[in-house]
Image (cartoon, grey):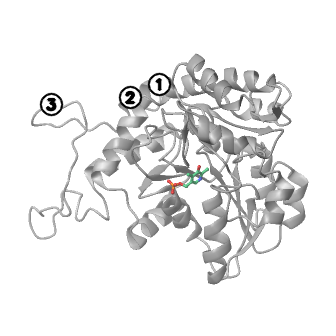
Amino acid sequence: MKSLKFATQAVHAGLVTDKTTGAISTPIYQTATFRHPALGQSTGFDYSRSQNPTRQAVEEALAILEAGHAGFAFATGMAAITAVLMLYRPGDHLIVTEDCYGGTYRVLDKILVQFGLEVNFVDTSNLEEIRKVIKPNTKAIIVETPTNPLMKIADIAAIVALARKNPARPIHTIVDNTFLSPYFQRPLTLGADLVIHSGTKYLAGHNDVVCGVVVTGNACLSEQIKFIQNAAGAVLGPQDSWLLMRGLKTLVLRMRRHQENALTIAKWLKNHPSVTAVYYPGLAEHPGKAIHDAQATGYGGMLSFSVDHPRLPEQILRKVKVHQFAESLGGVESLITFPSVQTHADMPLDLRRRLGINEYLLRLSVGIEDVDDLIADLDQAMSK
Ligand SMILES: *Cc1c(COP(=O)(O)O)cnc(C)c1O
């Protein structure tokens, strides 16, 4: 499986063919527990929190697609992130992308600080900002690239080099790879230790399931995450594991189309008289483009843009017909959100202001519809 090309792996990896019937689709093992053949014997499965064959199939596929050691499927992306954060102890220090997913900010700022974790939120697109806050107790650098919603780019390999600089005190590099998916970016091949996904987004891809993923870069981390997954228990159920696996099969086709549509829309927005800025790493003028091009093979389907009037976002959200005004991203349907009052509402106002997550900024998750319809929809919604 490892020697096959990505698109082939996406279709075949992890597949369990039912020996009795030959069913091509991996069966949904909707069971809580498993009968033991005899005392001291096991089929390899004991109880579905520990492992379930359908979940195991998708976990294997995820490990292969991210070029990792092992994959782990969780009930949500936040459950995956929380499981990774459970690797750390009171007094440990983490460095996290400042314009990260709002839920990541919330779980760190409101919950994990209560357990004694110290966190610095910094601009991880600036290596110097990371270097400045590294301390003897720094245990992990958690990055999103591109970031949400401003599409800033962090240099994964350079961060890994910084994290490994002191061999006596290695620091984990953890990448939330939700925005690009392994089709466009594989952080473990750049030296990262762990990859996290909200599988809800591009991996599952159809806005019909919430799920989360962790892929580890080595056996030691696999053992630790496996232990946490079973002990804390926020596992993905068999039905949802099957949906995630079904989504993976079309990941390549979807990502190509998301990207093609996003690039067309980004260029169209750039020339719109009411638009003051477009944030998309595929645009030639994007500040992180050179770094992005060196570590990823595509730009994905997410973009943000600013308009010239504070009342325009409200009008656009009211008037769109093809685009759905909804949170989330990465599905086949195009979604539009207003980060300052939705996805990033839990971020302190001064940080939002400084980052530019303001009342002029809208975020698009560009779907796989016909791009002409998407542009016509935005055009009518934006006309004054
Ligand atoms: C949505 C999202 C999450 C959280 O995932 P859920 O599946 O909603 O729990 C984490 N990181 C990023 C970048 C996301 O977009």
Q: Callout 1 environment at 10 Å: few (<14), some (14 to 19), or many (20+)?
A: some
Q: Quadrant of the C terminus?
A: top right
Circle 1 sits on which residue?
Answer: 7
SS label for mark 1? helix
> The disc labelled 3 sits on which kind of residue?
Gly
SS label for mark 2? helix
Relative depth, front residue between 117 and 150: 150
Counting residues from the start of the chain, the first of labels 1 and 3 encountered is 1
> The disc labelled 1 sits on which kind of residue?
Ala
Q: Quadrant of the N terminus?
A: top left
Figure quadrant of residue 259: top right
Which residue sits at x=34%, y=48%?
A: 241
Lateral position of residue 229 relative to residue 257, left or right: left
Circle 3 sits on which residue?
Answer: 22
Please report contact status of discs 1 and 3: CB closer than 8 Å, yes or no: no
Please report contact status of discs 1 and 2: CB closer than 8 Å, yes or no: yes
Q: CA distance from mark 1 to mark 2?
A: 7 Å
Asked whether residue 282 appears in the rendered view, the answer is yes
Circle 2 sits on which residue?
Answer: 11
State whether label 2 is within 8 Å of ligand 1.
no
Q: From what the image shows, is residue 358 above or below residue 333?
A: below
Which residue sits at x=86%, y=66%?
A: 133
Lateral position of residue 67 relative to residue 115, left or right: left
Lateral position of residue 261 relative to residue 275, left or right: left
Q: Callout 3 environment at 10 Å: few (<14), some (14 to 19), or many (20+)?
A: few
Q: CA distance from mark 1 to mark 3?
A: 23 Å
Residue 84 tag number: none
Which residue sits at x=51%, y=43%?
A: 201
